Image: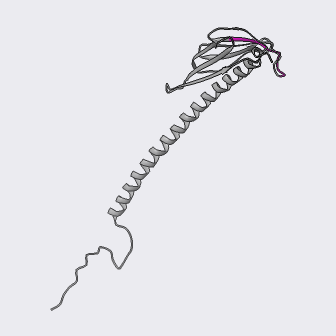
Amino acid sequence: MMTRRVRTDNRRGGEAGFTLIELIIGMVLIGILGGFSVQFLSRTMQMGQLVSGQKSLVDEAKIALDRMAREVRFANSIASFTSTSITITTSGYAQDTSTNVSYSYSGGVLTRTGDVSGAHTIAENISSFSITQSGSSFYEFKMTLTDTDGQNFKLMTAVFPRSKVGV
């Protein structure tokens, strides 16, 4: 009796390679992984841009508050102040010989005005700003910023002018 072997392998003569089904399954899996990777990377880039924008917004306002606090701290006197502005008298700086300096808030913008240097915007995108006086000469500056996504950032600093200390 003679037995015949039936060949179940579709490959001829030991040829190596992939079948069409294997190639299609591989391409589908690579496509799925690629889709997830693109979504992950785009979300990461969006978050990076958002954080960068928030950082620059807060940094600008922080620098403005620090400058205002420093000038009020070293002022010869506080000429006047309201809830949104303060005017000080200084002996002038090398780069700005102004003797009267005002900081004022209006329309989302904080402006510094010197009698020699003129007006300069020092911070923008401010949703609220206030100056309060505690005691006879302790001043608090509060600022709220709103970014493009509607998120609020609150900054506050306080200063006690040296002219009040009697140095």
Question: Could you say which is closer to the camera, residue 95 or residue 26?
Answer: 95
Residue 82 is situated, as x and y percent measured from the top left of the image, at 64, 8
Location of residue 159 by image quarter: top right
Residue at position x 32%, y 62% in the image: 21
Q: Position of residue 73 (x, y in %)?
A: 74, 19
Image quarter (top left, top right, bottom left or bottom right) of the C terminus: top right
Kindly identify the residue that appears in the image at 41 percent across and 52 percent down.
Answer: 33
Q: Which residues are magenta?
A: 86-94
Location of residue 48 with respect to 8 vertically, above or below: above
- Name the one closer to the observer, 142 or 33: 142
What scheme was used to colour the molecule?
one colour
Q: Quick check: is 90 in the magenta stretch?
A: yes
Q: x, y percentage for residue 120?
A: 71, 17
State left or right for residue 113 relative to residue 9: right
Depth check: 20 or 95 in front?
95
Image vertical order of residue 17 relative to residue 29, above or below: below
* Image location of residue 136, percent across then percent down: 68, 11
**Residue visible at 76% across and 18% down in the picture:** 162
The mark tally for this picture is 0
Asked if the stretch drawn in magenta spans residue 15, the answer is no
Q: Going by the image, does 56 lie left or right of 32?
A: right
Please state if 131 lies on the left or on the right of 39 as rendered: right
Q: Quadrant of the N terminus?
A: bottom left
Q: Residue furthest bottom?
A: 1
Along the line of sight, the residue nearer the viewer: 22 or 116: 116
